[in-house]
Amino acid sequence: MTKKLRVLLTEFPENSHLNLAFEEAFFLSRCSEWTSDVLRIWRNEKAVVIGVFQKAEEEVDLDFANSNGIQIVRRFTGGGAVYHDLGNINFALSTKIEGEGQRGVDFLYDHLIYGAIEALRLLGFNPSKENFNDIVIEGKKVIGVAGSIRKDCAFLHGAMLFSTDLTVLSKVLKVPLKKLQDKKIDSVKYRVSTLSQLKPEIEQKDVILSLIEGFTKVLGAEGYYFDFPDKREIELARRLYSEKYSTVSWNFERRRP
Amino acid sequence: MRVKVETDEQRVIQSITITGDFFLLPENALWKLEERLKGAKLERNEIIKKIEQVFEETGAIVVGSTPQEIAEVILEAREP
């Protein structure tokens, strides 16, 4: 890849379901070769986003979510539930798998993830990777990523705790105790911090620029440019929204993709 | 990973759902696995065989776990 990286700041913070519809629309568009690589940076105002294999009632305190106006939306990638507020910065990269014989999974978790790790380095942190999909600073999780593969295209998205309200996070997410005892899962998944706690002087715009620079570097792109979603991406997102992401059967009944 | 399984008197699986925080690629392999396990006997060799079949057919990869570990979780599952 030698082109400039296309960057979108398209977000619908008040509508997490539409946000997640766009997430899949950008990936499918990249797979269909309509578009070049795309990095999207965006936020939800108040939402729990659960993994495709999860059930909301198992992961979320539904009463707490209800009484606090927290939306619940299921994404198309695996992994665990995350809480999003405006202090949580999401990034999503849709690209093609480079390198012959490269296993898609390794491309996601041993290559693309370094875009986010590099972003934290640029912000002056000393991050490390744990559990293959968590990024940790000083022993505390600040980013979790999840990805998917369709043939030769790869998708990696992640949630970065910038200034998230961790009190709400700990109330709305159920922490499975059995998991904490499971030797294979480091309990860092449940020890979290925010970038603002670690370095109060960091501003949101620094984070955005670092993410762009981190992923530009990991893709070997020659710089970047800002863009809007195109007409086909918008149409696809609207369809995904009405048929999938806005439905109870998708979000709560674990309807099959 | 959580497994909910219902069996009949002969320990034949009537319904099964595998939920939780894990990564299986392609994601569709999970629904295939659940379907394939329906009608299977809840005993080690048969469960492992069904899981291996689905993984072979779909080219599935489970990240951070193994097909054997999925089998263990299923075998540990209790009736709801």
Image (tube, coloured by chain):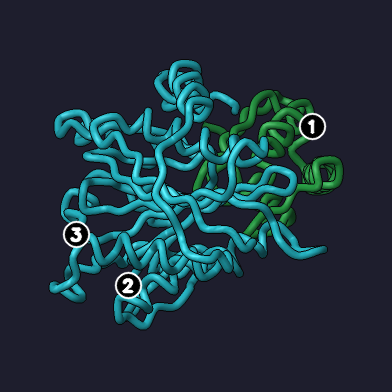
- Report the Cα–Cα distance between label 1 and label 3: 48 Å
Label 2, secondary structure: give it. strand
Estimate the x, y position of residue A65 in percent, counting from the top left.
22, 34
Task: State the separation of the CA atoms marked 2 and 3.
Answer: 14 Å
Q: Looking at the picture, which amino acid does disc 3 mark?
A: Ser
In the image: residue B46, left or right of residue A7: right
Depicted B23 relative to depicted B29: above or below: below
Residue at 37%, 78% in the rendered image = A121
Secondary structure category for the residue under label 1: loop
Residue B51 image position (x, y, % from top left): 78, 44
**Please, what is the three-letter code of the amino acid marked with disc 1?**
Ala
Q: Amino acid at mark 2?
A: Lys
Q: Nearer the viewer, mark 2 or mark 3?
A: 3
- For disc 1, the neighbor class at 10 Å (few under 14, some 14 to 19, many from 20) is some
The chain whose colour is green is B
Seen in the image, is A85 located left or right of residue A80?
A: left
Nearest the viewer among A218 and A66 is A218
| Viewer can see residue B24 | yes
> How much space separates mark 2 and mark 1, taking CA atoms?
42 Å
Tell me the number on the disc at residue B40: 1
Tint applied to chain A in the drawing: cyan
Q: Quadrant of the C terminus of chain A?
A: top right
Residue A140's tag is: 2
- For discs 2 and 1, the disc positioned in front in the rendered view: 2
- Which residue does the numbered mark 3 point to in the structure image? A163
Give the mark toward the camera: 1 or 3.
3
Res A19 label = none
